Each structure stands twice: as C-alpha cells, then as structure tokens.
Image: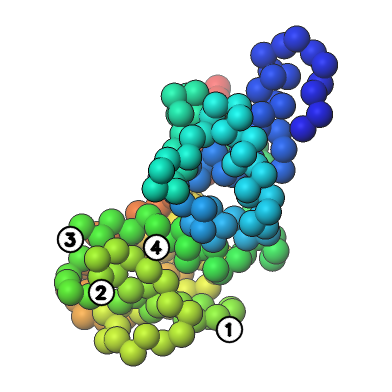
Amino acid sequence: MKSYGQYCPISRTAEILGDRWTIHIVRDLLTGTNRFNELIRGNPGLSRALLTRRLRQLVIADVVEQHPDGSYQLTEAGRALEPVVFGLAAWGAQWTFGEPTADELDPDLLVWWLHRQLDTTDLPRPRFVVYIPFEDHPSRYWIVVEDEASICLADPGFDIDVTLHTDRTALYRTYLGRCSLSDAHRRGEVETSGSRDGVKAFFNAFRQSPVSTMVAAASTPREPTT
C-alpha cells in the first residue's frame, strides 16, 4: 500500500492492514489457521499469488513469521492485533450485519468454517461422518472425522452418522451466532437425522464462529430506555 505520508499511528496501522484481504488473513491466523492452503480455502476469491504477496508484506511488517515447517504464525505484534480485529467484528455485528445477500451464501466457505470449528475430542471413533445436502444448493458435503476433520465433495462411501437438513441461510445464521443450534433445531430451521447417539455427539461437537458471541449480543433486543 502506498504511504499516507502522515506521521500518525492510525496511518501506520492502515498501511499494514488496509490492503484487500490482509485483515482476513490476520483474522484466520488469529483463529488457528496457519497453513498456506488452509488460508486459500478459507478465503474464496483470494489468489495464491496475492496471498503470497500479502504474507510477505506481513512478514516484513513483523506481524507474521514463517516457520521452518512452512507454517505461518503471528508474532507478538500480530497477536496484539486480536482486540483490533475482533473490535471490528463487534462494531460490524452491531452496525452493518444485516441479512445475508445471495452472493454471501457460499456453501463451500460455510462448510469449511464449520468443519474447522468442530470439537472432535469426544466424537465416536474410528470415524464419524456428517452429511450436508443443502436444500437450496446442488452441492453436497461430507465432513469425515477420523484423526482430524476433513471435507469430501463426493460420497466417500462411509456410513453416515448425522445428516443436516437445512438451507444455507439458516446454517450461516446458526453458525455465526444469530441463534443457537438448539433453537434452530427447535424451530425446524436446522433438522437432523441419524441415531440418537450420533445426533447428540454432533450437537456436543458443534461450535459456532469465533465472532458468534458478538453477533448474538448485537442480535439481542435491547430494553427500551425510560
């Protein structure tokens, strides 16, 4: 980014974070993504060439460092951006986060986020499979949990433990914290089929977005002032 030419800490920060996709890269690094290909998968529309350039800029700015194993990790300065990034999330949830538009309902991204957040600790082994056939989109997804969770875009041929019956809007709203999974299930917005133990295990493993508490707080009706 071209310098603003202002001796001001806000200007200096904007010069580091203001380029397209940079804040998303920092967001993902803050929430546990640290591999190049994972950063690509979590940001549809970000090219590999541009990600390479942005990571290089963040390394030069001493916000990110690349480890010998190829992973990218935030430096002390990078980790100190957490209140800045999540402060943007809190402001956005309060003032700009209305209903989603059609071009924001990317099912690939939603399932990617969902599988990254699953708490797989207590899921049955050796394998647990979640099937997601969206009602409003032709793509089909299988989340397969073995040693870790992965996504299949074609039937892997394994027994399915839980099927989610929902549309993209309902699952986005649930994942992002507009409502809990239990509330969405009770209203029929996200329905499940499978064995009782399998459904219970999925409910226990489901984790909402890292910004869900902010979205939930902004979605709660305020008491009228007197």
Q: Residue 128's mark?
A: 2
Nearer-the-camera pick, 205 or 165 = 205
Tag 1 or tag 2, which sits nearer the N-term? 2
Check the picture and name the quadrant holding the N terminus.
top right
The answer to whether residue 173 is above or below residue 127 is above
**Residue at mark 4 to residue at mark 2: CA–CA distance:** 12 Å
Q: Secondary structure at mark 3?
A: loop
Judging by the rendered image, the residue that carries numbered circle 1 is: 138
- Which dot marks residue 115? 4
Asked whether the residues under the numbered discs 2 and 1 touch, taking CB atoms below 8 Å apart as contact, a structural biologist would say no
Q: Which mark is residue 205?
A: none
**Distance between the Cα atoms at labels 4 and 3?**
15 Å
The spot of residue 204 in percent (x, y) is: 24, 59
User: With respect to residue 130, does 20 lie above or below?
Assistant: above
Mark before the other along the chain sequence, 1 or 3? 3
- Mark 3 and mark 2 lie on one chain; the one further toward the N terminus is 3
| Picture residue at 42% right of the left edge, 72% below the top | 151
Q: Are marks 4 and 3 in contact (CB under 8 Å)?
A: no
Mark 4 residue type: His
Work out which quarter of the rendered image holds the C terminus and state it.
Answer: top right
**Sequence order check: which comes first, mark 4 or mark 3?**
4
User: Callout 1: helix, strand or loop?
Assistant: loop
- Image x and y of residue 71, in percent: 44, 46
- Proximity of marks 3 and 2: CB atoms separated by less than 8 Å: no
